[in-house]
Amino acid sequence: MIDDSLTDHELDDLLFSVSAKSHSSVHWTPIKIAKQAAKWLAPSAGIKVLDVGSGVGKFCIVGALHTEGYFTGVEHRSQLINQAKKALKKASLFNVEFLLADMISIDFTKFDSFYFFNPFYENLVPNLAIDAEIELSDQKYYTYLSHVYHQLETLKTGTRVATYCANDAKIPPSYELVFSTPENNSLRFWIKR
Ligand SMILES: C[S@@+](CC[C@H](N)C(=O)[O-])C[C@H]1O[C@@H](n2cnc3c(N)ncnc32)[C@H](O)[C@@H]1O
């Protein structure tokens, strides 16, 4: 049973395959960070949160367990989406969905809050990539950053963003930085003014 007291290792063992677990320490958000970010992104019931690049779904699942928000994960690797859907069944949660898509095709206006765990960096450092399913390039990195920047710029006042280990170049100046962890500034919260 999934409960509040699980460590990252225990949660990974319960939900994920051996291959998914092997990427956990580098690519999936630790529970402590996921809880903190999800509580900021979904402060009340029904808030719609988009995890941009959701991997095997760890952030969304932890967020859904600890808030009353509705979490959508978009992920462009089919193998990871399949894993996420299996994990979701095991977790028996009804406030999460996973979409197989390039995030560029997603309408950001349908969401209140956004989570980014450095999703596009693999394009600059391909040997960090999870697998070879997706073609990577420097050009894609800059296209994605620019797309996100322009999407965020158009969203309503009060839109919330959390970034973890992310390149802040994609956050427009209309977003105020309201929180930053002391250790390497790795978790940051932003709000659209
Ligand atoms: C660092 S992992 C974070 C996973 C998840 N958000 C978490 O915190 O547990 C980043 C994920 O973004 C995905 N990704 C990268 N670019 C993407 C894009 N353009 N559209 C959808 N997913 C993308 C990668 O495949 C990878 O699974």
Image (spheres, helix red, strand yellow):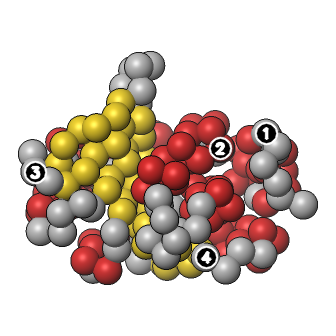
Q: Nearer the viewer, residue 42 or 114?
A: 42
Quarter of the image with the N terminus is bottom right
Residue type pointed to by label 2: Ile
State how far apart marks 3 and 4 are (Cα). 30 Å
Asked whether mark 4 lies closer than 8 Å to ligand 1, one says: no
In the image, what residue occupies the spot 27% across and 73% down?
A: 108
Residue 43 x %, y %:
47, 58
Say if 133 sits above or below 12 in the image. below
Q: Amino acid at mark 3?
A: Ser
Please name the residue that numbered disc 4 is placed on. Answer: 95
Q: Do residues under tags 4 and 2 come within 8 Å of each other at their CB atoms?
A: no
Quadrant for the C terminus, please.
bottom left
What residue occupies the far front of the structure in this picture? 44
Identify which residue is drawn at 25% across, 51% down.
191
Which residue, given by chain and number where applicable, does mark 1 sit on?
A: 7
Q: Badge 2 is on which residue?
A: 31
Label 3–label 4 contact, CB within 8 A: no
Q: Can you tell which mark lies on residue 174? A: 3
Mark 3: secondary structure: loop
Residue placed farthest to the right in the image? Answer: 1
Q: Name the amino acid type tagged 1.
A: Thr
Q: Is residue 124 left or right of residue 51?
A: left
Q: Nearer the N terminus, badge 4 or badge 2?
A: 2
Instruction: Mark 1 or mark 3: name the one nearer the start of the chain.
Output: 1
Q: Are marks 2 and 1 in contact (CB under 8 Å)?
A: yes
